[in-house]
Amino acid sequence: MTFLVTRPREQYPADALAGIAGDARGRLRAAAWLAQLAYEDDAAKVDSIARDWSLRRILSRAPRVLALPWQPETRLHVLEPAGGTAGPSVVTVCGTDPLRFANWVTNLNVMPAAGGVHSGFLAALDAAWPDLEPVLRERAGPVWIVGHSLGAAIAALGALRACETLALTPEAVYAFGMPRVGGEAFAARYEALLGARTLRLVHGHDVVPRLPPDGIGFRHVGRRLTCAHGARFDPAATAAARDEEPLPPQTLPGLFMDTLRLVLPLFETLRDDPVGLATGLLPAMIADHLPDRYCAACSP
């Protein structure tokens, strides 16, 4: 993956997973950093971070070197507890790298496939399933499936397929900045099996959860948890049932200011590395979608 989505090694906190067996806030923080880890494709770096987190990498899936530009580039890691430690095994799925053409082909292939599912997301799961399925079949303990953006959409589809074809029900699915994945029939099927186990997080003005539009039949899955721009997620505010993105009432001056925040640079950053500083030039609708913003919003 490119420098736009990876992070410097020193920015991965050694205690990121310290609360994975604790309360909801600790699990949120752990899931956010696990979703960020999916963007790393340097095996030595991933293994080093995994050791800090008492995990062991058992699979890294990357696309074939000679893959055609329109073939899905689905990347993921599977990790399990190391050294006798307790905790879930984790499937973490990589999201969109803005500099990877194949990712955009996947995202824009919105025509519904069988079952009313986004064709691009389904093709991305199909590409990775032959590598992922045998590893999932071997899991005896609890499993988390996590992802950010495109990775969240693939994670949700993978969780449902594991449930329906492997009789493996993930303990939790964490979806950060997830786009809509399928139509009403798909959403109903998903909710019946995994709705209560799926947490769909939306940060600030993030535009991606508004896509593809519900006006063309796409629906969300899971329990929604939102927070304001620059705020922290409060697990107690999780929606009780599946819903779509709300459009809160606004006064005319408030709507004008929100529109300015969406399209103008905020000059805010959470990191002091060059890429992190450059994100301050992004409008809120894009900046609020970045994985580092989700990690910050899940911090204590």
Image: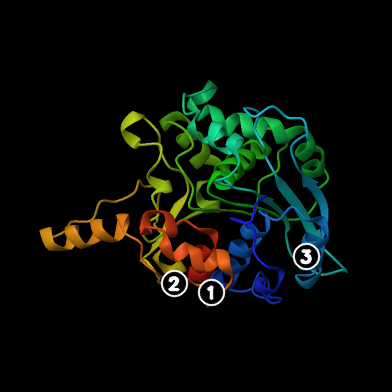
Mark closer to the chain start, 1 or 2: 2
**Residue that extends furthest to the right in the rendered view of this protein:** 83
Of residues 11 and 219, the one drawn nearer to the viewer in this rendering:
11
- The answer to whether any part of residue 164 appears in the image is no
User: In this rendering, would 64 be left or right of 176?
Assistant: right
Mark closer to the chain start, 1 or 3: 3
What label does residue 130 carry, if any?
none
What label does residue 232 carry, if any?
2
Residues marked 1 and 3 touching at CB (< 8 Å): no
- The answer to whether any part of residue 78 appears in the image is yes
State the residue position of label 3.
50
- Placement of 297 over or under 289, stated as above or below: below
Tell me the quarter of the picture where residue 172 sits. Answer: bottom right
Q: What element carries label 3?
A: helix
Task: Identify which residue is drawn at 64% across, 58% down.
Answer: 6
Residues marked 1 and 2 touching at CB (< 8 Å): yes
Of residues 173 and 5, the one drawn nearer to the viewer in this rendering:
5
Spot occupied by residue 258 in the image (x, y as percentages of width and height): 24, 60
Mark closer to the chain start, 3 or 2: 3
Q: What element carries label 2?
A: loop
Task: Identify which residue is drawn at 59% across, 71% down.
Answer: 273
- Placement of 193 over or under 229, stated as above or below: above
Spot occupied by residue 33 in the image (x, y as percentages of width and height): 62, 64
Task: Identify which residue is drawn at 63% across, 67% down.
Answer: 30
User: In this rendering, would 29 be left or right of 82?
Assistant: left
Amino acid carrying mark 1 in the image? Ser
Amino acid carrying mark 2 in the image? Arg
State the residue position of label 1.
299
Residues marked 3 and 2 touching at CB (< 8 Å): no
